[in-house]
Image: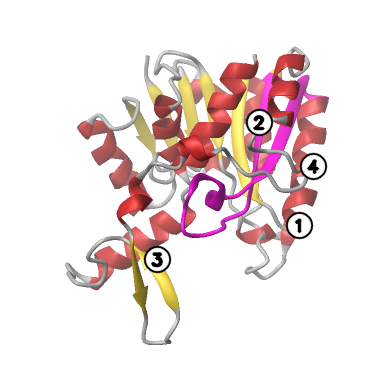
């Protein structure tokens, strides 16, 4: 019942170890090697495997959704920079396009269920086409939705593609119907999906409205900017947060899968 976390950034990797020690995410091992250096045999004894693990939000969201630590699953949010509208637009030519390495491990180890996420840009959709084609060629059915953090009450949009791969079997019809309308009040639009209001009670309730030096108004955490414990720590935390998925969105996506199968 041990999880595997693959994370190349030392700061985030240590954060993962701290979260494991505190019991916030599934217990396991943190591997700081590049996914390019990970071999299938390295993963044989792990129940759950989290690639591009960041600060462990997939594991946290799985728990929040009611997914037990001893239930097998893989997750991976491949780097979004090659496909982000804010990036250089290198796409599949970018050295950070690491899906082929993730797919190789999936193909060799054949986990039953794989969850993933990617930026919902035009290039991100092209990336998803590749992912679903590769998964189909490996014997996986897959499904995806395009949803935003604001749909769970977050103070930002953060539009993302969430996908799931299901080994050996078609995506269950119950799951397809479930994703058509997760709740009567949500996920009605086939292009942009909003989640229901019953998931909107969360940490953002206590956030504050503040105006910055640029005269733009932003929603920030309580006491944000009032205490400083070192620029290095702040930069590291902001980078880790910026690369992380939004836990309530992932939680609702996982829960929808669990309810539909």
Mark closer to the chain start, 2 or 3: 2
Q: Give the SS element for disc 1.
A: helix
Mark closer to the chain start, 3 or 4: 4
Q: Which residues are magenta?
A: 137-166
Q: In what quadrant of the picture does the C terminus appear?
A: top right
Which residue is found at the position 54% from the left and 52% from the top? 150
Judge left or right: residue 15 versus residue 113: left
Task: Report the disc number at residue 65.
Answer: none
Task: Report the disc number at residue 219.
Answer: 3
Residue 52 in the magenta stretch? The answer is no
Inter-mark Cα distance, 3 to 1? 29 Å
Q: List the residue tagged with mark 2.
A: 184
Asked if one can make out residue 226 in the rendered structure from this viewpoint, the answer is: yes
The mark lying in front, picked from 1 and 2, is 2
Task: Report the disc number at residue 130.
Answer: 4
Inter-mark Cα distance, 3 to 4? 36 Å
**Front one among 227 and 136:** 227
Task: Report the disc number at residue 123.
Answer: 1
Category of crowding for the residue at label 2, using alpha-carbon neighbours closer than 10 angstroms: few (below 14), some (14–19), many (at least 20): few
Contact (Cβ within 8 Å) of mark 2 with mark 3: no
């Amino acid at each position: 019942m041990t999880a595997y976390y693959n994370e190349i950034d030392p700061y985030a990797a240590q954060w993962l170890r701290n979260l494991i020690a505190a019991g916030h995410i599934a217990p396991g091992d943190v591997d700081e090697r590049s996914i390019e250096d990970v071999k299938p045999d390295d993963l044989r004894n792990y129940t759950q495997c989290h690639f591009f693990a960041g600060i462990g939000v997939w594991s946290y969201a799985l728990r929040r959704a009611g997914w037990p630590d001893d239930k097998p699953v893989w997750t991976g949010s491949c780097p979004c920079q090659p496909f982000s509208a804010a990036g250089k637009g290198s796409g599949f030519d970018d050295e950070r396009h690491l899906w082929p390495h993730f797919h190789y491990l999936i193909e060799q180890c054949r986990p039953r269920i794989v969850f993933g996420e990617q930026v919902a840009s035009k290039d991100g959709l092209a990336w998803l086409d590749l992912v679903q084609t590769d998964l189909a060629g490996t014997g996986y059915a897959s499904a995806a939705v395009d949803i935003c953090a604001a749909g769970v009450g977050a103070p930002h949009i953060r539009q993302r593609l969430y996908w799931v791969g299901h080994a050996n079997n078609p995506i269950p019809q119950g799951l397809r119907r479930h994703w058509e309308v997760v709740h009567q009040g949500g996920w009605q639009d086939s292009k942009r999906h909003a989640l229901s209001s019953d998931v909107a009670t969360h940490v953002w309730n206590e956030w504050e409205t503040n105006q910055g030096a640029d005269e733009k108004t932003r929603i920030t955490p309580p006491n944000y900017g009032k205490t400083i414990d070192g620029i290095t720590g702040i930069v590291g935390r902001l980078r880790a947060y910026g690369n992380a998925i939004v836990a309530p969105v992932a939680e609702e996506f996982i829960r929808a899968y669990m309810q539909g199968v």
